[in-house]
Image (tube, helix red, strand yellow):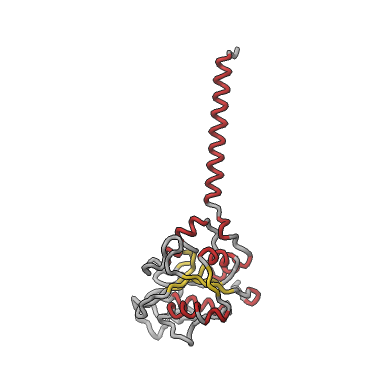
Amino acid sequence: MQTPHHARLLTLWLSLTFAAAFATLWQTANAANATSPGSCGPVTAQGQQLQTFLDQSGVEHLWLPHVHVHWLSGEPDLKRPTKSRRATHCSGYVAAMSARLNVPLLRPPQHRAGMLATPQAHWLSGVGKTQGWRAVSMQQAQTLANAGEFVLAVWANPNPRHSGHIAIVRPSEQSAAHLAQYGPELTMAGHINALRISTARGFEDHKGAWVAGGKGSVRYFAHTVDWAKVTLPQ
């Protein structure tokens, strides 16, 4: 027979059990909300086209650092087989991708392939505005890339004797907190060739370029893409 004392213990046990279960559900929901990628918008169908385009660009084995390359193909330049510790190809890769997407950008032969990133940065903020480019914020950069626009992260080196850096913002769903800490996700050539790399990591060699919260001197520019005129490899 159940005594009043036993009934009170059972009621107390059930209350504690339900409270613990509720607390676990509440923590799980909060964790999900904290990592929700919705702040930068979803990756649209055109964003997926941009992902595929970048994934098929061959940047992980072309435009390699310390090798002289043909800027448009990224293949090694056999006429210049020697290596160079200074040879990196961030701007050549971006120029090649802009050509494939039919997006205007400063590139050879208008400017030599070497030391091109800083001139590209100046071009984007000047002439580029008359050719469809617009300056955007850090969050807009990720959101627009997710929607399939061609978005560039660029840093102009204040020392004309040294190169700047430029990279392509790739579609990536991420939280506002992650974006503020690490910046938009990039595809790039340079001191590192990577399909996926954070702005913080990609610009780490350039002092003051990336500062958490987007307070550094990296700038972002966006241009629409007519995906109906872009043929992706099968």
Total number of numbered discs in the rendering: 0
Q: Is residue 23 above or below residue 169?
A: above
Tell me residue 29's x, y (percent). Answer: 56, 44
User: Quadrant of residue 159 in the image?
Assistant: bottom left
Pick the residue in front: 141 or 83: 141
Residue shown at the point (34%, 78%) measured from the top left: 84
> Taking 11 as reference, is 192 above or below it?
below
**In this orientation, which residue lies closer to the viewer: 185 or 181?**
181
At 54% across and 28% down in the image, what residue appears? 16
Q: Residue furthest right?
A: 228
Location of residue 227 in the rendering, given as x and y in whole percent from the top left corner = 63, 73
* Spot occupied by residue 43 in the image (x, y as percentages of width and height): 59, 62
- Quarter of the image with the N terminus is top right
Q: Is residue 200 above or below residue 234?
A: above
Q: Is residue 51 visible?
A: no
Q: Is residue 226 left or right of residue 214?
A: right
Q: Is residue 211 left or right of residue 145?
A: left
Residue 14 at x, y = what percent? 57, 26
Regarding residue 127, the answer to whether it shows in the image is: yes
Which residue occupies the foreground of this view, 46 or 211? 211
Quadrant into which the C terminus falls: bottom right
Say which residue appears at 46% left-offset and 79% top-offset: 122
